[in-house]
Amino acid sequence: RAKNQGSNRYVVYEATMKEQSLNKIKIESELRRDIANRKLTVYYQPKFDTGSNQLVGSEALIRWEHEESGFIPPSKFIPIAEESNLIIDLERFVITEVFDTIGEWKRKGMPVPRTSINISVIHFYQEDFVDFIIKNLATYEIDGSDIEIEITESVIMRGEERVNRNLLALREVGVEISVDDFGTGYSSLSYLQKLSVDRLKIDQSFIADYESNKEIISAIISMSHNLNLKVIAEGVETSNQIGFLQNMNCFEVQGYFYSPPVERSNYEDILTKYGVAS
Ligand code: C2E
Ligand code: MG
Ligand code: MG
Ligand code: MG
């Protein structure tokens, strides 16, 4: 067969492809198992107001500690989960974990800013997505105003009617909607006026090299202000970036400068130390 006549290089290439797909299958089945056993963890990254140095919110980020390989980064397993419906189970794990935690915080009387949860395209378009959220708000005795949903531009590109129905239903119960990684997608900007979103999250790639991206960043910030949207910068690591953003009237930031994503108990310490911005 043609395969057997190929060069060594071809054979090596083929083996690598096979290895890769086996590795993917392995990751998928182990992830499925660990989600079913609720063995994953949710980390929280605080979002700060640079004016008061207090918290304006936090983002829930999934962490998977594999029994042999240690922590596997989300960039490695989220795309695999997104190729199957596994992403739905994964995000429903995050949703219920976060809701449960917020419920505990509230019962303890802690002041808690909004916690955001990342939702993928596949999950957002799942028939019962909004029902799942609303049902669980009741189950865990928390409010829509305790949470925020982060969607990407790819969610919006899929078709307006269904998107807006979901967005409106979420906002009706007080949930806020943010557009994550803003500026990296290919969607038309007209949706910002038509759809019910609350906030843009400036993608961290712009902030990382802010000096080359000054015009783009300032355009996103003024557009947010003109459209009455809130705006937050992601991936903020230096005080120079903060100074630049403040000059542009952007005061909400998230990034290593303040804190990386941390375990729940560390997040509680940060919350207690800095407090919630009014
Ligand atoms: P994202 O939603 O844009 O989350 C922000 C990512 O930037 C996080 O990476 C966070 O750790 C990282 N980050 C925060 N501050 C800084 C900084 O100052 N510098 C740099 N270089 N990075 C910073 P993480 O936790 O590895 O997650 C990567 C992506 O994986 C997330 O990007 C999100 O798209 C996805 N992800 C994580 N958890 C979930 C989830 O529960 N559901 C879905 N659908 N996606 C998730
Ligand atoms: Mg996000
Ligand atoms: Mg992002
Ligand atoms: Mg991202």
Image: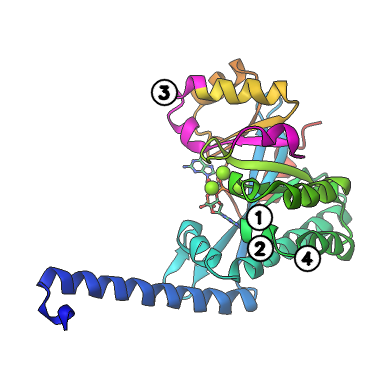
Distance from Cα at disc 4 to Cα at disc 3: 43 Å
Distance from Cα at disc 1 to Cα at disc 4: 14 Å
Q: Earlier in the sequence, mark 1 or mark 2?
A: 2
Which residue is pictured at 80% across the width and 60% down the height? 133
In the rendered image, residue 145, in percent from the top left (x then y), is placed at: 84, 46
Q: Residues within 10 Å of mark 1 (few under 14, many from 20)?
A: many
Q: Earlier in the sequence, mark 1 or mark 3?
A: 1
Quadrant where the C terminus sits is top right
Q: Is mark 1 within 8 Å of ligand 1?
A: yes
Type of amino acid under label 4: Asp
Vertical comparison of 104 with 245: above or below:
below
Q: Are marks 1 and 3 in contact (CB under 8 Å)?
A: no
Which residue is pictured at 53% across the width and 73% down the height? 31
Quadrant where the N terminus sits is bottom left
**Pointer 3 residue:** 212
**Pointer 1 residue:** 119
Instruction: Tell me the number on the disc at residue 128.
Output: 4
Which mark is nearer the camera, 4 or 3? Answer: 4
- Residue 110 visible in rendering: no
Type of amino acid under label 2: Glu
In the rendered image, residue 120, in percent from the top left (x then y), is placed at: 62, 56
Q: Which residues are magenta?
A: 188-215
Distance from Cα at disc 3 to Cα at disc 2: 35 Å
Vertical comparison of 154 with 226: above or below:
below
Q: Is mark 2 within 8 Å of ligand 1?
A: yes
Quarter of the image holding residue 12? bottom left
Instruction: Tell me the number on the disc at residue 91.
Output: 2
Residue nearer the viewer, 148 or 59: 148
Q: Earlier in the sequence, mark 4 or mark 2?
A: 2
Which mark is nearer the camera, 4 or 2? Answer: 4
In magenta stretch: residue 108: no
Q: Earlier in the sequence, mark 3 or mark 2?
A: 2
